[in-house]
Image (cartoon, grey):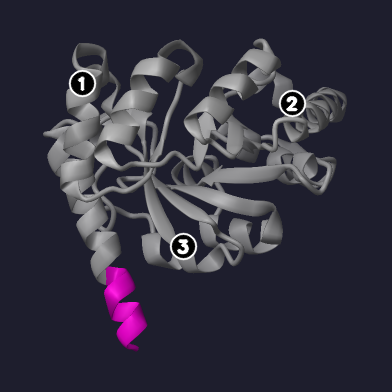
Amino acid sequence: MTYSLQLYTLRNAIAEDLPGTIAKVAQIGYTKVEPYNFVATAKELGAALKENGLTAPSGHAPLLSKDQDEIFAAAKELGISIVIDPFHPAEHWQSAEDIQATAAKLNQAAKKAAEYGIRVGYHNHEWELSSKIEGQSALEYFAGLLDPEVVLEVDTYWASVGGEDPVELLARLGDRVKLIHIKDGPGNRDTKAQKPAGQGSIPVLDVINAAKSLEVGVVEFDDYSEDIFEGIAQSLAYLTEAAGKGSEA
């Protein structure tokens, strides 16, 4: 298991100084990142990653609404092997018909991605869990419609906000889940109250252990009321220490 950092966490710092921010991420000890909006920043971001010895196994891009060839070309340039659609609004998750249409679009995107040697996936918020379709969460109904090569990146914090136990959810979704977003806090919509991993109400280590086919665990803060660089450093230290204890057991 390796850990990555969703760069959306540092969006304000990146807007001011992308190369300097990426250098700080490497200094803290991260070796992998998950870029967002990478089509717009591909050249500068690629140079910064290379200079600091970082890789980007996954990245977020609006596959369901933007030019997919442009996205996949930029992903290939950055070495991103999994492109994840990060956001599909709540109104698309309220009926079986709408979810079927979304799944069909993502399955089609996967076929195009394969031409570039890339996989595609989807990242949830709370509404894919709070909405129920045919006796299950909309996300699980959606997962049942996806082609085998399409993966899920489960945001375990928003799953909890949506009313699901993230550990049980991951067990039900099984091998479909290749990435998770690791974040902690009170488990509500107050994103400013989010905390470094291990300091909130989310059972972070149980969550990680529940994802049996996990390739990358991605640290993220939607927001944070304190120093964000301290926050991401504390999260990585907690996860690294826990991994060390696990290997000694």
Residue 208 is marked as 3
Instruction: Please give the name of the residue rendered at 34% of the width and 41% of the height, measured from the top-left corner.
Output: 54
Residue 145 relative to residue 243: left or right = right
Q: Which mark is residue 28?
A: none
Q: Could you tell me which quadrant the N terminus lies in?
A: bottom left
Would residue 26 be found to the left or right of residue 114 on screen? left
Q: Earlier in the sequence, mark 3 or mark 2?
A: 2
Depth check, mark 3 against mark 1: the one in front is 1
Q: Closer to the camera, 49 or 211?
A: 49
- State the image coordinates of residue 38 (x, y, percent, origin top left): 46, 20
Q: Quadrant of residue 119?
A: top right
Q: Pointer 3: residues within 10 angstroms few (<14), some, or many (20+)?
A: many
**Label 3 – label 1 distance at C-alpha:** 28 Å
Labels 3 & 1 near each other (Cβ < 8 A): no
Say which mark, if any, is on residue 94: 2
Tell me the mark number nearer the camera, choosing from 3 and 2.
Answer: 3
Residue 44 vs 174, above or below: the answer is above
Tell me, yes or no, whether the highlighted magenta stretch contains residue 120.
Answer: no
Q: Which residues are magenta?
A: 242-249
Is 172 left, or right, of 141 in this rendering? left
Q: Quadrant of the C terminus?
A: bottom left
Marker disc for residue 13 = 1
